[in-house]
Image (cartoon, rainbow, N blue to C red):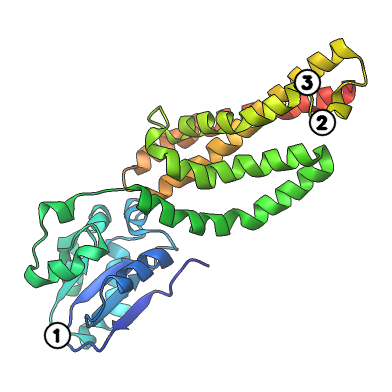
Amino acid sequence: MHRAKPGLYKLGNPTPDSPVFVTANYRLSFDELRTALPGIDGFILVLDTRGINVWCAAGKGTFGTEELASRITSSCLGDAVKHRRLILPQLGAPGVSAHEVRKRTGFLVEYGPVRAGDLPEYLKTRKATPDMRRVRFDLADRLILIPVDLVQVLLPTLGIAVAFLLIGGPLASIGAASAILAGVVLFPVLLPWLPTPNFSTKGFILGALVALPFVRAILMGAPASVWIHHGKILALWSRTGWAAVYLLAMSPVTAFVSLNFTGSTPFTSRTGVRSEIFTYVPLMAWILGAAAVLGVILSILG
């Protein structure tokens, strides 16, 4: 859905002397590059990164030497241009061995600026200023990614919300949807201000905060008919138990969704993400499992 077809594209009315820009087939990256070059004639060589952005694809090897060399050959780029120079995004450098590409294809790899928006200025001198080399990930950059992720989770979230509506009622349905959407929408917005260095623990904190209104609603007696018909003492324990279920269930869900955002940031590493996955995903599963068990026990007692 979010992939451009790999291959060679024309930008404007290029000639054999026009520049060649290389990018990933992640649709957002491809569209951003085209939008940043108004009035410029050239070629865009799109690599098959399996719909992953340049930075993450470079770390995973899909935006790499092998794919670049193969795509140069399969697209007949050598026949389309007279020169032998490619302009790659700076964030693609970890995945590409420039000397190997030149050895195999004859094309020289040139690293342009971090941001596609700086390319018009870069083309004037073919030199990047220190500011062009600086990696930033501001609020605007994070907000752009939210609609893309929303489209991906919209149908699953709707299905989960309907399932929980049938199983646990309106409050459970809203809680399930809120836990997922918090990781998709709130996490990118609040990322710099959430404490702890890990995405997973940031997600746990955010999930707990999102769960607090539901905990308060349960402890204050909404919906009252579910918890008061066994008497006041049992109602107090029952409400406390259900409040714990919401807190235990929502936190790991938000943390898991938030962990997926590592693939959209320019400052995570492949080893760091793997470490988080192996450390925190089992913990998320155990906590979510504990919430499910507690919920079943409370349902039986109720």
Q: CA distance from mark 2 to mark 3?
A: 10 Å
Snapshot quadrant of residue 35: bottom left
Task: Give the number of the mark in front: 3 or 1.
Answer: 3
Counting from the top left corner in percent of width and height, residue 201 is at 47, 29
Give the amino acid at mark 3: Arg
Q: Is residue 136 above or below residue 229?
A: below
Q: Secondary structure at mark 2?
A: loop
Q: Residue at x 24, y 49 (%)?
A: 135
Disc 2 crowd rating (10 Å Cα; few below 14, some 14-19, many 20+) is: some
Residue 74 x/y as whole percent = 33, 79
| Residue designated by label 1 | 17
Callouts 2 and 3 close, C-beta under 8 Å: no
Where residue 17 sits, quadrant-wise, is bottom left
The residue beneath circle 3 is: 239
Front residue of 284 and 175: 175
Q: Which image quarter: residue 27?
A: bottom left
Q: Earlier in the sequence, mark 2 or mark 1?
A: 1
Report whether residue 223 is seen.
Answer: yes
Residue with the mark numbered 2: 223
Q: Secondary structure at mark 1?
A: loop
**CA distance for labels 3 and 1:** 72 Å
Q: Are marks 2 and 1 in contact (CB under 8 Å)?
A: no
Mark toward the viewer: 2 or 3: 2
Looking at this view, name the residue that lies furthest to the top: 233
